[in-house]
Image (tube, rainbow, N blue to C red):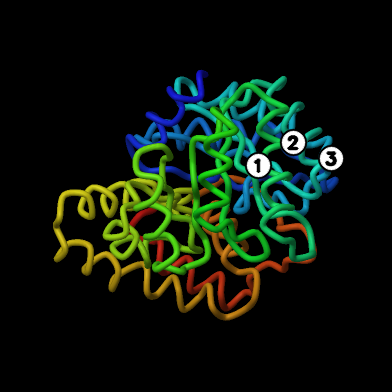
Amino acid sequence: MDPQDLKTSLGSGLLSFPVTPFGADGGFNRDVYEKHVGWLSGYPAATLFAAGGTGEFFSLKPAEIPEIVSAAKAASGEVPIVSGCGYGTEIAVDIAKAAEQAGADGILLIPHYLIDAPQEGLYAHVKKVCDSVGIGVMVYNRDNSILQPDTLARLCDACPNLIGFKDGSGDIGLVRQVTAKMGDRLMYLGGMPTAELFAEAYLGAGFTTYSSAVFNFVPGLAIEFYDALRGGNRGRCEEILNDFFYPFMAIRNRSKGYAVSAIKAGVRLQGFDAGPVRSPLTDLDKEEMGLMEDLIAPYKA
């Protein structure tokens, strides 16, 4: 897909990151993944992100990523597929090239590993990844990879295939400065954990869409919330926040890493044998699984 076509697709609706299922041997379970992605593709998501944060990118071997991308492409129909990409620059370049070869329509560049870096280093990192592929690239602004507006502007000048800016920092002042400076040069994606909790604030800051993790297991509800948000139906948004998202947040906040583990639990409860999360994450305990089951009972497929 041409980078500009992907940019248009990203801005046309809700986005999501399918979980990565693992089998009894601990390896990628392609059959379950294709069934799950096929189910999700029956709902109007604009783009799906394979091997992203909710897909446990941080626990995958780089060699596993192309097969996950290939499986997503096989199951997604016409829905574009963006691949996770990250670690140090040289590894990120290798992952980006392999994902492109496997059929990815774009790359989401997740923060590099471990250390903080100066703006010049971040510029060189992002540029080298962009230069290594012909598909569209989105940067994920969070943790130890916070791009300042001037650095982002330089990258946009140097990299025609840099099409998106995803924010997981929660720094509304910074992201508003980015949207004001860059205008429609980029597509802006909300990327806070459980993004619906922040969606109204990000919409006000100039973001047109966000990635919904709960789309993995309650896709109809995720779409309903997105439509209510974009339609200005604040009352319905508040109903869904109170009935679903705030109770989900309470479960998610019971342990570190549950922003991913609780999503995978929801997928299992919807009948997809997604297997456990990989360490260093841990799965929900029996009590927490009961809370999740009660929460999603009205939305069971």
2 or 3: mark nearer the eye? 3
Name the one closer to the observer, 40 or 280: 280
Q: Are marks 1 and 3 in contact (CB under 8 Å)?
A: no
Measure the alpha-carbon separation of dots 2 and 3: 16 Å
Q: Are marks 1 and 2 in contact (CB under 8 Å)?
A: yes
Name the one closer to the observer, 9 or 239: 9
Please state which amino acid type lies under the numbered disc 1: Gly
Q: Earlier in the sequence, mark 1 or mark 2?
A: 2
Looking at the image, residue 72 lies above or below residue 22: above
- Give coordinates of residue 252: x percent, y percent: 53, 72
Q: Residue at x 46, y 79 (%)?
A: 250
- Give coordinates of residue 240: x percent, y percent: 27, 64
Q: Are marks 2 and 3 in contact (CB under 8 Å)?
A: no
For disc 1, the neighbor class at 10 Å (few under 14, some 14 to 19, many from 20) is: many
1 or 2: mark nearer the eye? 1
Q: Earlier in the sequence, mark 1 or mark 3?
A: 1
For disc 3, the neighbor class at 10 Å (few under 14, some 14 to 19, many from 20) is: few
Name the one closer to the observer, 56 or 141: 141
Q: Which residue is mark 2?
A: 65
Measure the alpha-carbon separation of dots 1 and 3: 15 Å
Number of dots carrying numbers: 3
Q: Secondary structure at mark 3?
A: helix
Looking at the image, residue 150 lies above or below residue 168: above
Q: Which residue is mark 3?
A: 90
Please state which amino acid type lies under the numbered disc 3: Glu
Q: Residue at x 52, y 72 (%)?
A: 290
Q: Secondary structure at mark 1?
A: strand
Q: Secondary structure at mark 2?
A: helix
Residue 128 quadrant: top right
**Would you say 98 lies left or right of 274 here?**
right
Q: Which residue is mark 1?
A: 84
